Image: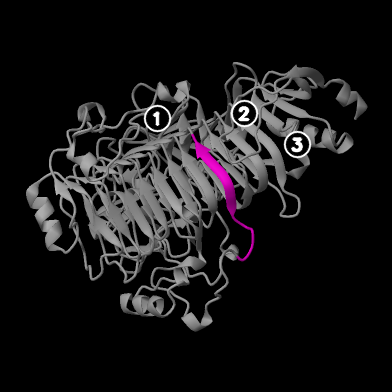
Amino acid sequence: MRAQLAQVLLTLVTIIGTSSCTAPSRSALPDETYVVLRVSANAPAGGYRSLDLALAAAARLRREQPGVPLRIEVATGDYYIDAPLQIGADLSGTQSFPTLITAAANQKPRLLSGRLLRPVWQPYRDGIFRARLTDWPVEGTAFDQLFVNGKRQVRARYPNYDAHIRILNGYAADALSPERVRNWRNPAGGILHAIHDHLWGGMHIPILGKNSDGSAALGPAVGNNRPSAAHATYRYVENVLEELDADGEWYFSSSESTLYYMPPKHIDIHQATFAASGPARILNVLGARQSPVQFVRIEGFELQRTAHSFLQATEPLLRSDWMIAREGAIYIENAEDVHVADNTLSELGGNGVFVSGYARRIGIAGNHIHDIGGSGISFTGRPEAVRSPSFRYEQFVNFDDLDLTPGPKTDEYPSESVAEDNLIHDIGTMEKQVAGVQIAIAMNIRVAHNTIYRTPRAGINIGDGTWGGHLIEYNDVFDTVLETGDHGAFNSWGRDRFWHPDRGILEQMNGRHPELWKLDVLQPITLRNNRLSCAHGWDIDLDDGSSSYRIYNNILLGGGLKFREGFDRAAWNNAIVNNGFHPHVWLEASGDRFEHNIVMATHQPVLMHYWGAAVDFNLFSSPSALERAKALGVDRHSQQGDPRFANPAAGDFRVPPDSPAIAIGFENFPMSGFGVTSDRLKRIADRTAISP
């Protein structure tokens, strides 16, 4: 051990770290001596050629010298990962000296889940080649992503992939037609991907083989927590050999360990580089509850090529519409003061960063997350932390059986954590129940200055009211709900202990127990100073039971604002452009307020019997819109008129001092600062299209 330690370089480095619920930053602290372990794919004999060797050496060093500050530097290169890299409590640092796992200065190391393949190709038929993978690890196992010369290829599918088709990149009603299935010799291992019949997300249905009548034998659908038939039209079939008929398509027979591929004309199949995807996790930051990982910083890496996780999306999130796979390229659980900064996560099969269970003061900042199969960033606690949980929309716990103790049951949930200055786009390429940032069974999460776009469903989602305190601010979210419907750029549910799927029982229960809704949402959730746009749903969708929200100083550019049944929501001083307010199914004594907003359409109520505490002092853009609102018995003091926005084409929705908006109590707020703040991300981020 002493000889090995003698080879370790000692150097002076700048400490980078933070331990509070703020974004990790590169602010310099005083220089101190770190022990540096250098990783290079071209390291000389005795050096570290892989990150797992360096992590193991660091753990041994820490055991021998418990207080030694550690920095692991990784040079440019491709590092293939065939098992998750483990970062446990034995690598914990301190607040003054966090353990740094980082790219070396001006270097861009890539951590690639999976392995290189060495196929020897033989012609098969119709332009298809095949190769038996004699070096594949275990016969009967499969991989689900293939990369040729570094570019992801398309697994055999019908209809063929078309990047220009918005929904599923191509769909066909006859994907499972008898005529098509008849041509499949053995479709076991195939998958039917489909949108929910009501457009509430997507689902994935394994094909198990053929029935005796020749039809496809299907397994249970996964991925969606609102049971439904698969959409009759929005569907496609993947991973069936007989559907391999387009350039760049491939199929792997696990039973024969044989890879089939139709190379495009520009690829020399005998000279090309082939690689297969690997584990769903690349970095597994996992401590024990009594011994969490502490004070670790991960920065500067590119992480790519994890396996798909859609077939593992079987865990329901309380009564959310979603099911999840508790996986991520960077997975964090039983951890404190861990920061993930300035990384690029792309071409992943599933989620980007997943913060699970017990987690405190986790910072996810400055990352570029794109072209992935699942969600960008997830903060998701364990259901064991929830009192009297229910897991499906139609399920409930009878009042007499409810645990009426407020708050969480255990501490197995993320809290005091932040997602800030992340660029997240083109996510949910496989799973449709996804969000740029997703929060469930968590408390006090700050989501700030993120730019999120091109998502199949939500931009930001809060799946329940447990336990509130979240702050959503200065985000720029647009081009959302592109493949589904009835959702939002921001979406939430609140199907907590007070909520019941039967409206009559819901009203009766809360009429008798008016404090019941306060058991789970302990602190208000705030949305402020965001710019949000959704073309196929609402800009802000507070759905079933969402309670205790404060919504102000937001620019809403497309779908407007929706409040469905819940309690204690207040929206004021928002500029709702091109749309208006959507009150749905309010409860008696809800306490809801909608005041001092600019709206451009009349209210659009659904099943409204009660109108909350106040709907008034708003500015409507036309006399008819105001009159229709007054006819509903609200907006007695509201006015109509042109707000005279300063420069709506440029996104400036401030109003002059003599605007009628000022007369109803609207106050100007800053029209800048939305989205990412770091120069690196601002240079490459798309901008929302503003249609005044």
Q: Amino acid at mark 2?
A: Tyr
Secondary structure type for disc 1: loop
> Is residue 425 positioned above or below 611 on the image?
above
Q: What residue did someone put label 2 on? A: 79
Crowd tier of the residue under label 2, counting other residues whose Cα lies within 10 Å: few below 14, some 14–19, many 20 or above? many
Q: Which quadrant would residue 100 be assigned to in this image?
A: top right
Q: Indicate which disc residue 94 carries.
A: 3
Which mark's residue is nearer the viewer, 2 or 1?
1
Residue 566 percent coordinates (x, y): 36, 64
Secondary structure type for disc 2: strand
* Quadrant of the frame with the N terminus: top right
Q: Indicate which disc residue 673 carries.
A: 1
> Is residue 399 positioned above or below 612 on the image?
below
**Left or right, 502 with reference to 602:** right
Which of the two residues, 451 or 264, is positioned nearer the viewer here?
A: 451
Residue 619 in view, yes or no: yes
Q: Which quadrant would residue 223 be assigned to in this image?
A: bottom left
Q: Indicate which disc residue 650 carries.
A: none
The alpha-carbon separation of the residues under discs 1 and 3 comes to 33 Å
Residue 472 percent coordinates (x, y): 44, 44
Residue 127 percent coordinates (x, y): 34, 32
**Left or right, 78 with reference to 34:** left
Q: Which residues are magenta?
A: 409-420
